[in-house]
Image: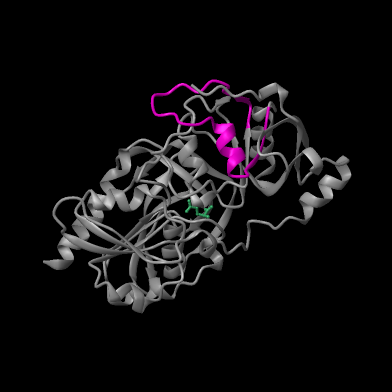
Amino acid sequence: MTISTRGAAQAPAVLVLEDGRTFRGRAYGAVGETFGEAVFNTGMTGYQETLTDPSYHRQVVVMTAPHVGNTGVNDEDDESKRIWVAGYVVRDPARIPSNWRSRRTLDDELESQGVVGISGIDTRALTRHLRERGAMRVGIFSGDALADDATLLARVQQAPEMKGADLSAQVATEEAYVVPAIGEKKFTVAALDLGIKGMTPHRMAERGIEVHVLPATATADDVYAVNPDGVFLSNGPGDPATADLSVIKAVLERRTPLFGICFGNQLLGRALGFGTYKLKYGHRGINQPVQDRTTGKVEVTAHNHGFAVEAPLDKVSDTPYGRAEVSHVCLNDNVVEGLQLLDQPAFSVQYHPEAAAGPHDAAYLFDRFVSLMEADRA
Ligand SMILES: NC(=O)CC[C@H](N)C(=O)O
């Protein structure tokens, strides 16, 4: 058992929002300074998956769950090779992790990976502030980085914004790699890594798909070099308005079965001619209600998105690649959560059917992708 000796003994830390609101607490993880976009995640479980989700690159994540770190850090649940969040904000860190898989404490893991965090602040007040004012830039400062409030505020206001940020290439693999099919191989999929989570190729592999994960900079020639039955567009950080759409357009031209998740949904939307916009504070958590309008069924789903597609909910749209419609919608706020083309085998969702962490209600979407590839072959 590892007992954290820190907690209240930690150095003072301060969190400064770009509108000047300030919260004082204790350093959690590394001591130092960090900047990013302040966003809140409402998941009661799954902090290890959250921390290692590359889509959180350059974001400071505020956990609304008041007690974080209870199950420590294990060697199985990482979604990528490292922690990506730019900073971490918790109310009450667990000092004694308790789980049969736990190998390290969360604060030790944050410290060893150099992730600056803060604990002991009123995360409910901070979340309500972000909900009312919207996601905004933030800084966390401790140790030598502490200074007077005006100096810290000026530094936060100089940090880069999320709008306009082109980040996929910073988090994606540089080299292509293959995730083999589990059991009999039935299909080959080329997956564009825009910030992919490890569970996603695994969910495909479980269905007999050999997944060729390609760098974010892959060209259409790279995609077709693997002779794919289908193409997959991953999740990823940053503003979808900055992404290059040439590969997606080439795939749509050739009518290859296409499935996208999250950033992938936004890029498919943009390739179809829809806009994307920044939500006020985004959807981040594992209990978001979504309706699949193609079946009427409601599913509880995992989300992590700050941008969304702007597409008409009440009519079929004509696009350069045929008719398209909104297939999924969030029941909390009517945000577009999925798109499907009616004249060719392409669809996408704004949320996370790979469910790491999260409920498994949306796993059928991987089966839908398999069905499209089967039909395309027939
Ligand atoms: N998880 C994702 O793919 C996030 C997509 C995009 N960066 C957003 O915040 O909306």
Position of 85 relative to 103 (above/below): below
Residue 181 found in image quarter:
bottom left
For this rendering, which residue is in front, 166 or 102? 102
Residue occupying the far bottom of the picture: 221
Instruction: Say which residue appears at 33% left-offset and 72% top-offset.
Output: 223
Q: Is the C terminus in the top left, top right, bottom left or bottom right quadrant?
A: bottom left
Q: Is residue 50 left or right of residue 92?
A: left
Residue 187 found in image quarter:
bottom left
* Residue 340 visible within the image: no
Residue 331 found in image quarter:
top left
For this rendering, which residue is in front, 245 or 277? 245
Q: Is residue 97 left or right of residue 118?
A: left
* Residue 59 visible within the image: yes
96 within the magenta span: yes
Instruction: Say which residue appears at 29% left-offset and 75% top-offset.
Output: 224
Instruction: Say which residue appears at 38% left-offset and 69% top-offset.
Output: 318
Colour convention: one colour
252 within the magenta span: no
Instruction: Say which residue appears at 83% left-offset and 51% top-offset.
Output: 154
Q: How many marks?
A: 0
Magenta residues span: 90-119
For this rendering, which residue is in front, 111 or 194? 111
Rendering coords of residue 54 (x, y %)? 50, 52
For this rendering, which residue is in front, 340 or 102? 102
Rendering coords of residue 158 (x, y %)? 78, 56
Position of 312 relative to 68 (above/below): below
Position of 321 relative to 30 (above/below): below
Residue occupying the far left of the picture: 378
